Amino acid sequence: MTRRRKIYEGKAKILYEGPEPGTIIQYFKDDATAFNAQKKGTISGKGVINNRISEYVFTRLSHIGIPTHFVRRLNMREQLVKQVEIVPIEVVVRNVAAGSLTKRLGIEEGTPLPHTLLEYCYKDDALGDPLIAEEHIACFGWASQEEMQDISAMAIRINDFMSGMFAAINIRLIDFKLEFGRLFDGDFSRIILADEISPDGCRLWDMDSGEKLDKDRFRRDLGGEVEAYQEVARRLGLLPEEGDSAVLDLGEHRAKKGK
Ligand code: TMP
């Protein structure tokens, strides 16, 4: 394999310098963390599934006019993306109360919200990604008001689209996290969707049984993580009906184990 310069290693992905200026390769790891990396583990084959699911979702979003950093999937674990300057804000979109919202405000998990709630967190691992208000974003200049208008409008459109996309495969989109970046063109920049969209950063419940098909299986020690991620991929039509595990047990993963 050719040697590539590693730019950054995060909790679930590694970023490498891309083949041409302005591009980056995103490598999806099997590593999983929760509660600001206090809990660590691996979900075998997760990286392959998330690479595939994120490719699919970003491609569908681009078809409805959402600008994204996604260029193309390169192989089982890597995708080529446009280099952006990440806006240091995690945008959390909520349709149903779950996770930190239930703890913070004492709302019962599963309570439908009267309207979609947008929350912002400051991206800083050392601080544990604290919840912030739009005033903090303006006050500290993390994003301009125009950028926040683009970000919030895109987040709402993405939620509308994804809620329908998942409902069509009998999955309820409870909440999810988005990250955006600045794409520079000379002195100008525009906001595009970056990072990934996968069961790592979404809460996805089976519409009938309420079964969790996302990273809460890992956070809460429910087991069956990879099966849940595979089920999402399968319902999205990203796996053949037969022999799913053969595809996602992923030669690459087996080869690594054999080393
Ligand atoms: P929360 O309930 O823990 O705040 O999470 C809300 C949603 O955002 C949930 O779908 C998981 C996702 N999320 C991430 O992807 N990364 C994070 O660091 C956090 C805190 C949440």
Image (cartoon, rainbow, N blue to C red):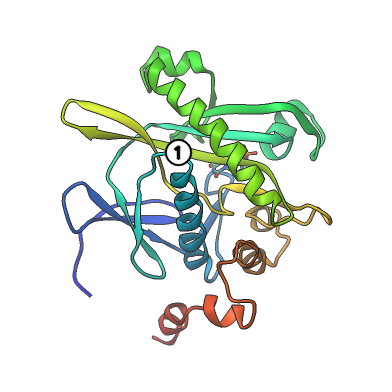
- Is residue 98 placed above or below 223 in the rendered structure? above
The image quarter containing residue 189 is top left
Answer few, some or many: residues within 10 Å of disc 1's Cα (few below 14, many 20 plus, some between 14 and 19). many
In the rendered image, the quadrant that contains the C terminus is: bottom left
Say which of 241 and 15 sits in front: 241
The amino acid on which the numbered mark 1 sits, given as a three-letter code, is: Glu
Image quadrant in which you'd find residue 258: bottom left
| Residue situated furthest bottom in the rendering | 258
Which image quarter is the N terminus in?
A: bottom left
Task: Name the residue: 19% across, 68% down.
Answer: 3
Secondary-structure class at tag 1: strand
Residue 249 as seen in the image, left or right of residue 11: right
Rendered position, 151 above or below 204: above
- What residue is disc 1 on? 179
Which residue is depicted at the point 51% across and 49% down? Answer: 197
Q: Please provide percent x and percent y for residue 164.
A: 66, 45
Residue 201 horizontal side relative to residue 126, left or right = right
Relative to 225, say whether 137 is above or below.
above
Q: Position of residue 210 (x, y in %)?
A: 80, 53
**Is 9 placed above or below 3 here?**
above
